[in-house]
Amino acid sequence: MKKILLLLVFLTTSLGQSQNLLTNGDFENGNTGWVFGSPGVVSSGEAFYSTANAGGDPWGTELKQTNLSFINGSSYTLSFRARAAANRTMSVNIQNTNIWNDQFRNNAVALTTTMTSYSYTFNATSTNNNAQLNFHMANMGVNTTEAIYIDDVVLVLNGGGGPTPPSQPVGLVVNSPTSSSVFFACGPNNAGSENIVYRLFYSPTATAPANPTTATEYIFGSTPGDGNGVSAFGFVLSGLNSGTPYTFWLYQYDSTTALFSPPTAVTATTTSAGSVPQPVGFVSNSPQSTSIFLAVGPNNLGGTIVYRLFYSPTATAPANPLTATQHTFGSIAGDGGGTSAFGFRLTGLSSSTPYTFWLYQYNTATAIYSLPATSFGTTSAAPVVLVPPTTNAPVPTRNAANVVSVFSNTYSNIATNYNPNWGQSGFGVLNQAFEAVPGSGNTILHYANFNYQGTEVTATNLSSMEFLHVDLWTQASTSTAIIKVSPINSGTGPNEVQVTINHTPGQWTSIDIPKSAFGGQTWDNVFQMIFAANGPGSTTPIDIYVDNVYFWNNPGVNTDATLSDLQVDSATVSGFSSSQFSYTYEIPFGTTEIPQITSATPNAGTSTTQITQASALPGSATVVVSSEDPSVQLTYTVNFSFPAPPAQPVGFVAMNPTTTTAFLACGPNNVDGNIVYRLFYSPTASAPMNPTTATEYVFGTTAGDGAGASPFGFNLSGLTPSTNYTFWLYQFNIATNQFSAPGSALLTTLCLPVNWYNDVDGDGYGVDSTVVTSCNAPSATYVLVGGDCDDSNPGANPGLAEVAYDGIDNDCDGTLDNGFAPFTSTMLNCGTTLSNIGSVISCVGTANAVEYQFEITGPNGVQTINRNVQYFSLTQLANYQYATTYSVRVMLRRAGQTNFVDYYGPACSYSTPPVTSPVGGVGSTQLQSYCGETLPTLATLIATTSLPG
């Protein structure tokens, strides 16, 4: 039990001893590590035997633990606590299995009804790696059938007594069974240090030997990835039988001392020859409004094994996933055709909808499906519905003599093709006749699904032009769409220089871009133009409306609205150029003080500036520059932003749950330098809105966790049984203090079997002998508390107080009327011979006694007689004999009670007189009772001699 275990741990530490060489010595993990002979069970954290065999061999009732190692001459201490239902003895011994010679033995451990600590120190008689500790309880003298309780069993190698065996390995996992193999993985533990190596044994569970080291041994170094037995490993163990449960034992082994650690045992069942393994590592992430990214490794693909994928909105998910929508492999680039690892974006989904995805491995030859790997994801909200402009752009008022127009209803146009096929996403969908104001006659170019768009014009020398004017309308957000424009020149100077149009979503943006902004273009032979969203080849199409695209000049008036310098916090913006109108200014994550534009210097002394500072972070500041010609304005924008957070990790999985652990694994992603992993987890039912407020796992505390700086695979412990958990894995930049979006995984821990006891009388307590260890109650009559001493009577259970003299052990402590003076009587005239067969036998009359039960034991067994007076005669019994000695004792019933007290007073012996020879000869009888005496009562029986025949 745990509080005692703390004491024992302190004791072993203070004595300088090594760890407990036994597994589960406190029985807190049920019967793990122990072999219970009938009727042994674990009850309330103790080994409990409700009875033991009365005869036969002592080991007919036994508790044992096998696979122990001892070193010849080394000193060991065995300690434990034990008690019994009545004073009795048992044997404790340590034997070398199959040889059956002793390392230690005590055949007379004296048990009492009080839990008592026992400790024995001994020297091992031989070196042996296959010994066993035995508690033998059968045929052990007095009270040999009485119940026994054992707890807190500790076996330690004493300091100075020789080398210690290696510690038991932790973190062993087995999964991905096929019909002939399983995957094994384990962290390094102590393997590779000093003389410690791994040794692995396995056997079909049905024929598993008592000593695992006699099972088949795997030869480390024979399979890639097995670490040669001296490091962490992950490999496929092959050559197994199909459809067979296997047990595997992993030891750490000291090659110098030849000592094995206690083994870590795991089980797995290979699939049937026709079955298909369940895929692992299937993930879904990066949702968009109509799509989700799905990915998985190759698993067992090859030959006739392929992938099959089904999906459904979670709310309407069918009971049989094979009836959900099926993805057709080979229809989307990256889906691997269903025959290889894949990573692709599944499209055609509904926005803002939770989806469930089922991935199977499928054998095309046998038409058999594996169990599915399941993943979940929710699509994002649909993009904003695009609303077209309902007003026209301002009508140009410039003199036509100073304008060369590409598209405008006000001027003649030199364009020859507004929608040439340059591979753009919106080819063929141009609406050249769109009217924002129906019937106005003012047509507008509407480019739907726009990522970039070319225009062909009559080759024209525009070198005398000073500006390019554009009117643009789009609803696209400035955070997702940066729209650029450039004339394309085939004369001197640069061919193409794209300049950003700083648009305002949902309204017309009119801009006049000076030639100087186009990085040295001469415009001496303009033959094409291009508009682009986020540059050529953009993959984020939007809708735009374009009007009044023309080149112009203004002779005699300064139209320069460019800047020669732009400073933030008194320093020139990095990469500043007069022709670049938008800048990204990165600030440390978490900055709260907004940077300020402190200087904006125009190239022309006649130009003016208007500065608008950013109001929040992230945010933007602007400088509007107005030339001497007030119609010419340029806007410079500085976008203050934080560094991009790390990428969301992919490939994060949680699997192989036990009652209190889960195996978590993930590849490297971007972990390196300042990028580390951070892991949080919570029961799903109480998961916080912000996962970083959940319980955080501390990397570096468990073998195989990669210390948060490398790929990992480890067992996370300390979980609660039968609980749904959510795990969130982040990549975290320790320099900028930024989290990525989390990768998440779900898992349910296994149930923890508990002891259930059948409670027939419904008092909340069951009988220990009916114990069933299970996750759930076997039936409605089972409860979690045992100890009921009489399950036919709800007035008897350990939770009740003792009631005096009712004949019931109310509190089930094994003692009637505990805490009260015994209510009994003693017999009178003990040891006498009755004067005649009908003489009265009496006990002491007792106050408050209303009934007496006499128990008479003689040659013909036991007889009882109930009397409301304190005496009786043998002649009132069904049978009695002359010249016979009887043992008599009495039990009382107290006034106000319906039952006798259920215990007798001391026994007393009485002898009947011999038979007197008859005077009438053969065949005659003689009155034997009360001859010559006065009868005690008128009802006294007068009897004759009972003669043969």
Image (spheres, rainbow, N blue to C red):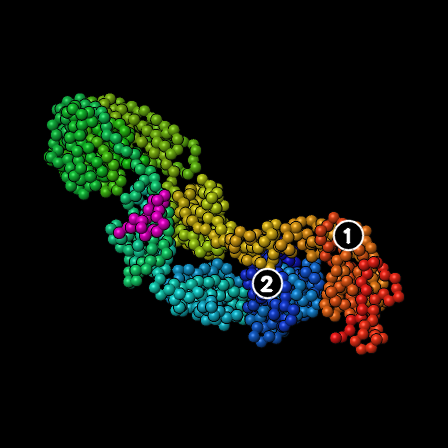
In the picture, the disc for residue 850 is 1
Q: Of residues 737 and 759, which is closer to you in this image?
A: 759
Q: Sort mark 1 into few (<14), some (14-19) or many (20+) by Cα contacts within 10 Å.
A: some
Q: Sort mark 2 into few (<14), some (14-19) or many (20+) by Cα contacts within 10 Å.
A: many
Q: Is 913 within the magenta?
A: no
Q: Residue at x 35, y 46 (%)?
A: 317
Within the image, what quadrant is residue 140 found in? Answer: bottom right
Q: Is residue 808 visible?
A: yes
In the picture, the disc for residue 229 is none
What is the x, y in percent for residue 500? 26, 34
What is the x, y in percent for residue 270? 40, 64
Q: Of residues 835 and 525, which is closer to you in this image?
A: 835
What is the x, y in percent for residue 242? 38, 66
Residues in magenta?
Answer: 311-328
Q: Residue at x 59, y 53 (%)?
A: 759
Disc 2 designates what residue?
A: 40
Give the SS element for disc 2.
loop
Q: At label 1, which amino acid type do we have? A: Val
